[in-house]
Amino acid sequence: MCGIIGYIGKEKSKPVLINGLKALEYRGYDSAGIAIPTNNKVEVRKSVGQVKVLEKSLANGNDFNGHLGIGHTRWATHGSPSEANAHPHRDCLGRVFVVHNGIIENYKELKGYLQNQGHNFLSETDTEVVPHLIENFLNSGKDFDTALFDTLKMIKGAYALAIIDAKNPEILYAAKLSSPLVIGVGSGENFLASDPSALVGKTKDVIYLNDGEIAKIKQNNISITNLEKQETPFEIVRLEWDLEQAQKGDFPHFMLKEIFEGPEVVRSAFRGRIKSEENLVKLGGLEQVANELKQVKRLLILACGTSYYAGLVGEYLFEEIAKLPTEVHFASEFCYRNEPFDKGTAVIAISQSGETADTLSAIQKSKKHGLMTIGIVNTVGSTIARETEAGVYNHAGPEIGVASTKAFLSQLTILAMMAIYLSKDKSSTKVLLEELEKIPEKIKIILTQSAKLEKLAEKYKDYENFLFVGRRYNYPVALEGALKLKEISYIHAEGYGAGEMKHGPIAMISQNFPTMAIVPQNSVSEKMFSNLEEIKARKGPIFAIATEGDEKILELANDIFYIPKTIELFEPLLTVVPLQLLAYYIGTKRGFDVDKPRNLAKSVTVE
Ligand code: F6R
């Protein structure tokens, strides 16, 4: 969703801001803008559409020459995508300039109050109340810092703010509440961003701002205080991600690059954490709660979207391997549940970005009920990583493509390791770990056959409906396959447990309604074959993901993609890969920008 970039330092800020905004594009946005103090005036430029439109409009002229600046990519919430609604927003006199991520819930009251005081508003946004409120306090004789602090105390909701005071262009102000903000620490320069990926190539040293903190960032100095103006200590954290990981390299899209990172992503998730020869899973991030975890009687997995589907696979894994009753909930629905909570329950929150608002509020609710919270998070230092008591990082590197692919594989790997870690019966641990170690090579075998999927995508790309079916471990994969296809190709696709087909969806089957069947040879393949017979009898085209060497499937499916054999519990790590590739190829063949699907944002920071 919206992105923030800020800069103060030795360089001219314009190119730094534009490059930062480009790095934030993957989050999803519909307009962009920057503000740069230049020669006693703050220059502002905004545009609707892509950052390159903004960049082009800034190509000529010397009017954006300052060394301080703020920039923003906006994903419309209050008011349509337009120049007027794009950030930065300003006060009446042109002293205060603000970019904002989050939602100001009481903006209507504040706006009414400010309008009564004579403030003139230029946009429909909630954000615009911020510069006007600061101005209002300045008008009453307060200094800038006090005006800012008093403003923040009046705002209800969530904010990450970057602010410029035109009268003091040596300071970049930042404030955070429930919306991420990170300071990049450089040499003779400092940065601000809503997402560390905007800082890649600039600095690896960052400070994660905490809720209720305000930063005054100068070229060579950073100070952070709380809302009571007391200095708060901060820690500089070193980022592991490098420039290459955040670039496409030779791949036409991030999505394809990230699918091809699958083998390495699985390996990175288990590297240093499993020792098959010693029957051992060592999850350092859980050590501090290890004793408590041993007492846990029930698990609750909370997540959204693809991470939720990974959680559904986790449900099967925890019950099968660790014999722990497990439930999975959409984080966005969890807040409406009034179930009696038991202290013997531990919550596992899964999130690639670590910033998903729904997941965050589900964690907060769990904590209020005294439940232990554990994170499976990819983004180091993100809010969910910090809000949970303990956790396991994915180490998958930045996922830039909006449709989540490699994060899913990494989440599955961690869930499998966690299930083995929590299991009291270690008799099958060795077999499981040895097989897990083989998974990267098996994914590689699938990837080397991507050309076959590209060809099949040509055949299937013009259908407007798809059914995805699987059973047991591959039921969540059916859901995820359908989600991938609809997200990036805008084809209607539904995922079902194959057993549910006869209870309704089979009514849709015809020669124009193909089925993607996930049917590897396993404990449920016979039942899957019966379901496919039913589809075939109704002339529905069938595309099957099957185990190499399976000949029976030849009688049922119109097209088959073979995957290597693995144990049933780990099948999702293989079966999802051809579905990701198929969605990618269908999306690109239909002419869409698969890295930035319409209406979607990478980091969903509103509920
Ligand atoms: C789908 C997708 C989304 C995310 C969901 C949760 O391709 O990317 O469904 O999985 O928004 O995001 P995280 O994992 O960042 O909490």
Image: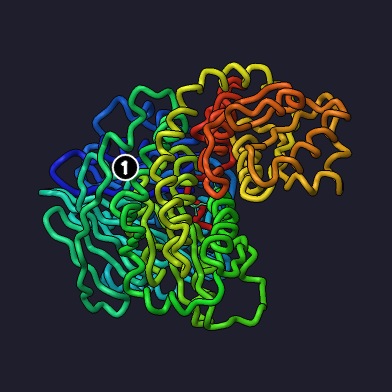
Residue 297 drawn at (x, y percent)? 54, 77
Viewer-nearest residue: 500 or 104: 500
Is residue 537 in view?
yes
Viewer-nearest residue: 62 or 373: 373
Residue 318 drawn at (x, y percent)? 54, 62
Instruction: Identify the residue position indicated by label 1 in the image.
Output: 43
238 relative to 480 in the view: left or right: left
- Residue lying at 16% horizontally and 40% vertically, measured from the top left: 11
Viewer-nearest residue: 275 or 591: 275
- Residue lying at 53% horizontally and 54% vertically, measured from the top left: 125
In the picture, residue 385 is in which quadrant? bottom left
- Residue lying at 31% horizontally and 37% vertically, measured from the top left: 245
Q: Is residue 326 above or below residue 255?
A: below
- Residue lying at 32% horizontally and 40% vertically, measured from the top left: 20
Q: Amino acid at mark 1?
A: Glu
Label 1 residue SS: strand
